[in-house]
Image (cartoon, rainbow, N blue to C red):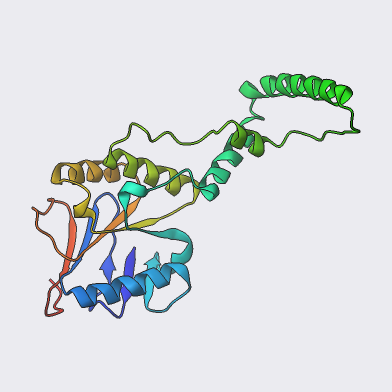
Amino acid sequence: MNLVTKYLENSLEIKSKTINTLVVEDIRYFSIFLKGLIESTEIESDEFELIEDYKTVDMTKYVEIIFDIFNLEANSANILKKMYSELEEDLNTQEVYTKKVELESIIANITDELIYRSRFSLKAGGINYQNLFKAIEIEFDYEKNSVLERLIEYIKVTSELLKTKVYIIVNLDSFLSEEELVELEKFLLYNDIKVLALQNAIRREVIPSENLRIVDKDLCEI
């Protein structure tokens, strides 16, 4: 997969199974680059193109820019809705279906009793399982996760449910230690997920397999 843009002299290959790092040292150029990148993930733009197998990838659908790892939230409405849909499909599997029928029978009996006791004329429909999952607060459990674990879990969840292909993390080095970056790379090694760290500086040792490109203060690419 390659990122093509007028802001880079050569297209940037975004590899799987490793961390891809793009360092733009000039602060003003970094800001311009990031602004254009954000716009390309919000609306269709010709400033940035993502090419995979000679085809253009829709960046508005398959690319996410992450600014703050601490506040990653997989329990957002659109992600939970996708997860609830999967759970609803599982209700019809052989292992669960019998229990589903039993549950619906119990709820129907309770509902009938409540309607009978009410002083109003009431009626009931079927069970909306997505609303039921929401009512009993089924969500992802992040309470005990470290920053790295939270990032990895978020990437796993959104890559599977939202089909996100590329995660662009701004100043990743500000959030993770060198040891944690190595652990992140180990996770990427076994998953077909692409991570691009967009930095304005690099002050650590380069990971041996890291895919690194530097645009220095003179805008020369190294």
Instruction: Name the residue: 42% across, 46% down.
Output: 73
Q: Spot the residue most to the right.
A: 121
Rendered position, 144 above or below 99: below
Rendered position, 212 above or below 187: below
Rendered position, 104 above or below 52: above
Quarter of the image where the N terminus is located: bottom left
Determine whether, in the image, residue 13 is placed left or right of residue 118: left
Determine whether, in the image, residue 169 is placed left or right of residue 60: left
**Percent x, y for residue 213?**
18, 66
Rendered position, 130 above or below 195: above
**Percent x, y for residue 72?**
38, 48
**Percent x, y for residue 12?**
26, 68
Of residue 110 and residue 207, the one placed in the foreground of this image is 110
Instruction: Name the residue: 9% across, 58% down.
Output: 203
Give the image quarter of residue 91: top right
Give the image quarter of residue 38: bottom left
Of residue 58 and residue 43, the one placed in the foreground of this image is 43
Instruction: Name the residue: 65% across, 33% down.
Output: 132
Asked whether the viewer can see residue 2, the reply is yes
Of residue 134 and residue 219, the one placed in the foreground of this image is 134
Of residue 108 and residue 87, the one placed in the foreground of this image is 108
Determine whether, in the image, residue 58 is placed left or right of residue 1: right
Quarter of the image where the C terminus is located: bottom left
